[in-house]
Image: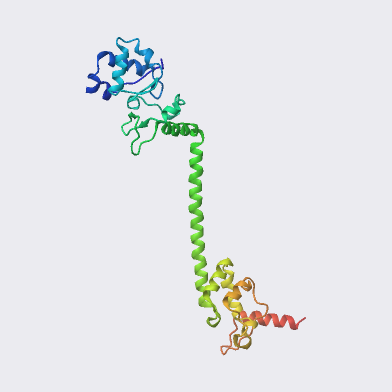
Amino acid sequence: MNGRRCFSGKITESDPFYALPGNAQALYLHLCMEADHDGFVNNAAVVATRVYGGRLALKKLVESPFLLKFGDIYVIKHWRISNSLRSDRQKPLNFPDLAGKIWIKEDGAYSDQPGEGQETLYDYRIGLTNGCQMSANGMAKRKEENGKEEKGKEEKGKEEKGRETRDEVWSTLLNAYPPEKLGNLEEAYDVFCRAAADQRMLENLPLWKQSEQWAKEDGQFIPYLANWIARGAWQRKPEKMAIPKGASGVFGQAELEAIRKILAEDGQ
């Protein structure tokens, strides 16, 4: 005896069940009590001897069909409609090979013929077993997966933000760099992306535009944009600043820095 068993009125109160002979109905109830947790009975022939006309009744249950027959093993066809267990109380399959030949229909009944979208009892139970085995760390795993997903979103957000910042720097750079020295923009953009440029590029560019080097020969020594980036000149300030000839008489920051440097050199 395998303890308590449930019986669904959908089965035992149905017209096909009442159409069975009385001994077949009685045998069905006894077989359900003898079945394991998946509805398998491996001693049906013995149980049938306890019921008057049990051998014929057993045959009738297979023909009805309320039982599926696999050699000496009988399976309660509507077992899952009447009985179910929580996944954490499932026991290992007693007949795993046979479970691979039984499909679970949409209504929960067993079938020995595969149907579209149906899974075998073996696949279903293995899924439950794995879920039960992982119940202790299932939440942790889901938390880890959620953490990875959130981290992925965060990294993606950072990447998108970084791309926006990079594009802003590039756009500002194009507008600020001497137009006659922009050169091949496709090449320049490729070098720009690989250089992982930051705000220093925009901070130092105005200084380079006022440098002594760039002021010589009407800008003859101004490098093309791709070269300026590739050489890393944007990461540092120019060594010498030019003092531009202006009519305003007002010195800017670049002019003041150049004057201070000249005065410092003269004082040495």
Count of numbered tags: 0
**Residue 14 appears in the figure:** no
- Left or right: 124 with respect to 175? left
Instruction: Give whichever of 182, 212 is nearer the camera.
Output: 182
Q: In this orientation, which residue lies closer to the viewer: 12 or 138?
A: 12
**Picture coordinates of residue 8 (x, y %)?**
29, 23
Of the 4 image quadrants, the one containing the C terminus is bottom right
Image height of 32 relative to 227, above or below: above
Q: Position of residue 129 (x, y in %)?
A: 46, 31
**Quarter of the image holding residue 63?**
top left
At a point 51% along the width and 50% down the height, the residue shown is 151
* Front residue (pair 239, 38): 38
Residue 179 lies left or right of residue 105; in this view the side is: right
Please determine whether, in this image, residue 157 is positioned above or below residue 252: above
Residue sitting at the far front: 71
Q: Check the image and report above or below for 180 versus 76.
A: below
Vertical order, 69 against 163 (above or below): above
Q: Is residue 187 left or right of residue 64?
A: right
Residue 212 relative to residue 43: left or right? right
x 52%, y 66%: residue: 166
Residue 138 in view of the camera: yes
The colour style of the image is rainbow
User: In the rendered view of the protein, which quadrant contains the N terminus?
Assistant: top left
Quarter of the figure with residue 266: bottom right
- Residue 207 screen position, x and y as percent: 61, 77
Residue at horizontal 48 percent and vertical 45 percent from the top: 146
Rendered image quadrant of residue 82: top left
Q: Which residue is found at the position 57% from the left and 70% from the top?
A: 191
Query: Percent from the top left, x then y, of residue 222?
Result: 61, 81
